[in-house]
Image (cartoon, grey):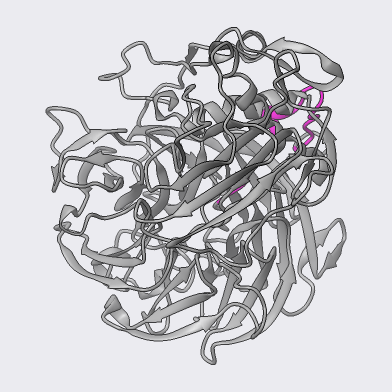
Amino acid sequence: MRKKIMFGLVVLVVLAVGSTRRGWLGGLVHATGVVNFIATDDVGPWFKCVGAGCVPAGTQSLAVVSPGTDVRITVGNESGTVHTFTSLVYPAGAQHMPFDQPSAFRASSRSVTLNDPGLYVFVCKVHPFMLAATIVDDPLTDGLDLGENVSLVNGITVPTSSDLATRLLRAFWLITNPANYQDHNPATNPSQTWTINYPAEVPVRITGGTKVDLKDTLEERYGNNLTLAPLFKPAQKGVGEVWVDTEYENTAGKTKPGTVTAVDASSWKITRKVALPEINMNNPHNMWTDIGQKLIYQTQWFDTKLTVFDRTTGKLVRNIDVGESPAHVMTRVDTDQVHVSINGEGDVLELSPGAKHIERRIATQYPGELAAQPHAHWMSHDGQIMVTPNSNTNDSTRIDIPSGTIVDKTASGFLPIASSIMPDASKYYVSNYLDSTITCISIGSAACKSGNTTLPTKNISLLLGGASLGNYDPITGTGFSTSGALPIQTPVSPNGKFVVTANTLTGTITIIDTASDELVKVLPCSAGCHGVNFGAKKGGGYYAYVASKFSNDLIVLDPDPNDDGNPLDAQIVGRIILASNAGDSVQADDQVTAHAGMGGQGVLPIPLVYNGWVQNLPNTWKKLLTPKQLNPIAP
């Protein structure tokens, strides 16, 4: 399974790179000596090629060089945090591969010499949508040579053709060029069409020496100028508010991207945009709130800060340095302490209520081990257990919170990125980004289901190996729309009945039934499907709110419309625009100038409705919920 999935990741950039060359082939001068990439916080060219060898063909993250050239990455003043420059793809048998660093770095450079012709792709393991590609090209061959075979970071060697390859090519142009993002706003995209602009007339040589024109191939297979799914409001109101990290919005008063957008769950209208220009808030990624639902705790993923602002006014309360690339944040239910995953290092930082000061660092790896680089952690209903997905070590850590000690470490899949715990703390789930799997891990006795038996752990494929779902054939392309690839946020519902996962490559929402630990439902999402969180539906039940990185809409999903505990009738019941327009009554502290509503990542519905948190709500919020919502796992 991993072979096929990672093959797709290879061709994502293999073909994307190839598709640009013909337009500049005649005048191309291959770089020699050194080709340079710099890490940035900008939207799209996160790894930006500068100087000789760079190819400006719809992406700023591509170079073509001669054999013997050094590829150098510099993490300097253009970025506010640490990164890795890790080889994801390289020619089979290439010298000096695979290339990686033991930990993320900043204020320095790393380089590797590329001698063998072919494709080399590098990724940041902390921020895995950051990509850079280099082609070591033989100038004597006809067209751009991609080679017969490439090897992957896990050592598997694969050919350079398949349906998954061209689908990932399509995704590459989307990711690296913000002009190709989905714009659902009728004010700026009245035709409501989605166009991806591909370089034309670029033949590339793929497996067997076959030459194809990539633009023609992509448009023949998948079309273009596609009609976007329409906006519409849910018929049933939600409770409270939904806050979304619109991480890619640019504003006039800042040099760094990112705002936080609030949506009223009754009117389904945007009410506020928080940019915090006074601190130049940098790529706001994930949020949580305090026991009183008065403060928003906001991480700055491309920086070192945890920001606290007032929910009702949007005013800054404090901005505290916590460490490199803080990713996710939650509160402990019994103490209201704040816990922040330090994604660029190896800790979860514990702060006092209100995040007034740091109290301790909780390690996610044993002494002497590589920094785990934890991303989206989760905490239990009683404040006793924390679990982390460790992007640098391909495992998950379970921590006893009161003592701050590691209880267990369990292998997961490749680049685990998000986790969530069952409301009774019997088991938890970890999404494995590059494997397109979810790992179920028991807490205590075996609790992961496989037919009529229980297991300590279980890997659930979202992409391959299913019967009617998750049965994608990467060669022919059948089953793509009923699968999930590159899964990210994956919360368990407050009542513990199902797991909802956002899948960024397939643009789908997958649902796992926790009674069977099987994939049971797949629904369409938007480009770059990323963030999911649960909020209360008025009158009973829950909505899952889903945000997407490369789109400006918020999907409202009802995972169980008749509240019978069976998600087979799950459906999308609303799609809300996250971009504000002239005439909208939106309070804002800065003016949006680009990428309006784009970059949806962290989602925070208020009030909190998860077991443990919901029981501690102030009465003003409790009175808006049903008895079943106030005790989500009560008999």
Q: Residue 544, can we see it?
A: no
Residue 93 makes an appearance in the image: yes
In x, y percent, where is residue 550?
A: 45, 34
The C terminus appears in which quarter of the rendering?
bottom right
In the rendered image, the vertical position of residue 321 relative to residue 563, given as above or below: below
Percent x, y for residue 511? 64, 45
Toward the viewer: 50 or 508?
A: 50
Q: Which residues are magenta?
A: 470-488
Question: Viewer-proximal residue, 151 or 540?
Answer: 151
Please tell me whether residue 437 is drawn above or below residue 117 in the rendered image: below
Q: Is residue 482 above or below residue 73?
A: above
- Main structural element of the magenta stretch: helix, strand or loop? loop
Residue positioned 75% across, 28% down in the render: 479
- Whether 222 is drawn above or below 373: the answer is above
Asked whether residue 601 is drawn in magenta, I would say: no
Residue under the point 63% across and 67% down: 102
Viewer-closest of 120 and 633: 120
Q: Residue 289 appears at what percent x and percent y?
A: 33, 66
Picture residue at 76% right of the left edge, 45% below the top:
152
Number of numbered discs on residues? 0
Residue 242 on image: x %, y %: 33, 49
Which quarter of the figure has residue 371?
bottom right
Q: Nearer the viewer, residue 17 or 489?
A: 17
Image-based side of 256 in relation to 483, left or right = left
Residue at x 81% of width, y 25% of height: 475
Q: Quadrant of the N terminus?
A: top right
Looking at the image, the residue that sits furthest to the bottom is 403
The magenta stretch spans residue 476: yes
Residue 61 left/right relative to 213: left
Query: Quadrant of the rendered structure where residue 25 is?
Result: top right
